Image (tube, rainbow, N blue to C red):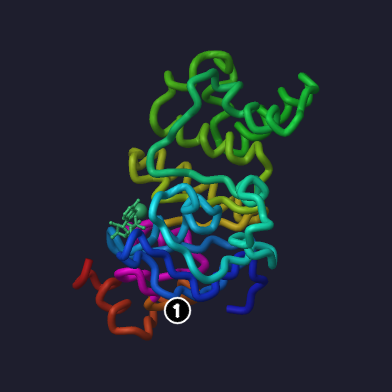
């Protein structure tokens, strides 16, 4: 697959204390496509995702070596500020964590922090991003009620809206549908397929069927090692590595 690279990972190793969680990972992530990181539990998927926005920084005893270039800039360079990196990325975690405030304020939160004061514009932004997240029609009459009153599925879409309102370039999802019912999961997946026109999306999943539905490109991790990566179709139809074959067949998990 010929592509424009958005995130370039070079010889990335991550240690929690003495235990390696990622071993010398080198891989390029394509711009405006969906990349799925697959692999069994505990294999380093979350660690890899978190290293993209330097969330690994905040963990005690962690050691990182190698490079992650985002738009050509090494995010581990001490000159680069974490906030500058994080502004480029919206993160959806396994469970939604809406802020303890209204639906409206959740979406307005990022733009307000970045200095948006115009009330009318802010209202338009809130509407726009709630529409982008397929939540608008369900909440438009109760924007000023607490976000905590929403269902889990709606909360996850609200978190997506909150992330998009910061106008990132990259959406990171760490098993973002794992707490959701099938209908809510479908809504998130449908949004991802639409949003990839404008955003680079990296989604961790251990659901192979989800990876097949979503991914243009796949990274297979096993015990901290990158076993294989490439276009989704090639990986699923014609994996090169024995380990990938077995994982896709379901003989290892
Ligand atoms: P995955 O997302 O694929 O389940 P993780 O990236 O969460 O994998 O974890 C990879 C490995 O690193 C696991 O062995 C896990 O126990 C270990 N690990 C993850 N987070 C921490 C942490 N904060 N402290 C120590 N070990 C950790
Ligand atoms: Mg994980």
Q: Quadrant of the N terminus?
A: bottom right
Q: Position of residue 68 (x, y in %)?
A: 57, 66
Horizontal relation, residue 115 to residue 75: left or right: right
| 222 is within the stretch colored magenta | yes
Q: Is residue 208 magenta?
A: yes
Residue indicated by mark 1:
234
Residue furthest to the left in view is: 251
Q: Which residue is more in the foreground, 209 or 66?
A: 66
Neighbour tally class for label 1: few under 14, some 14-19, many 20 plus, Cα within 10 Å: some
The residue shown at (76%, 30%) is 115
Q: Which residues are magenta?
A: 205-226
* Label 1 element class: helix
Q: Is residue 183 above or below residue 231?
A: above
Image coords of residue 122 (percent x, y) = 73, 25
Report the front residue among 71 and 165: 71
Residue displayed at 61% across by 29% down: 107
User: Is residue 178 positioned above or below 17 on the image?
Assistant: above
Q: Nearer the viewer, residue 39 or 212?
A: 39
């Amino acid at each position: 697959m010929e592509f424009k690279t958005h995130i370039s990972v070079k010889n990335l190793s991550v240690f929690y204390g003495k235990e390696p969680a990622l071993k010398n990972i080198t891989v390029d992530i394509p711009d405006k496509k969906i990349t799925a990181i697959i692999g069994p539990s505990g294999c380093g998927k979350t660690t890899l995702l978190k290293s993209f926005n330097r969330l690994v920084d905040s963990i005690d005893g962690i050691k990182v070596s190698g490079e992650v270039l985002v738009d050509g800039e090494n995010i581990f360079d001490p000159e680069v500020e974490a906030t500058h990196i994080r502004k480029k990325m919206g993160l959806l975690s396994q469970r939604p964590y809406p802020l303890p405030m209204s639906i409206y304020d959740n979406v307005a939160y990022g733009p307000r922090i970045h200095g948006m004061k115009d009330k009318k514009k802010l209202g338009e932004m809130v509407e726009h991003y709630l529409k982008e997240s397929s939540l608008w029609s369900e909440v438009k009459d109760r924007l000023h009620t607490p976000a905590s009153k929403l269902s889990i599925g709606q909360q996850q879409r609200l978190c997506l809206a909150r992330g998009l309102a910061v106008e990132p370039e990259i959406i990171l999802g760490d098993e973002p549908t794992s707490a959701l019912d099938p209908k809510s999961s479908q809504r998130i997946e449908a949004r991802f397929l639409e949003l990839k026109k404008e955003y680079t999306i990296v989604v961790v999943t251990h659901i192979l069927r989800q990876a097949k539905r979503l991914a243009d490109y796949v990274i297979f991790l096993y015990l901290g090692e990158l076993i294989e990566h490439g276009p989704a179709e090639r990986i699923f139809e014609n994996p090169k590595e024995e380990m990938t074959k077995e994982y896709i067949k379901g003989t290892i998990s």
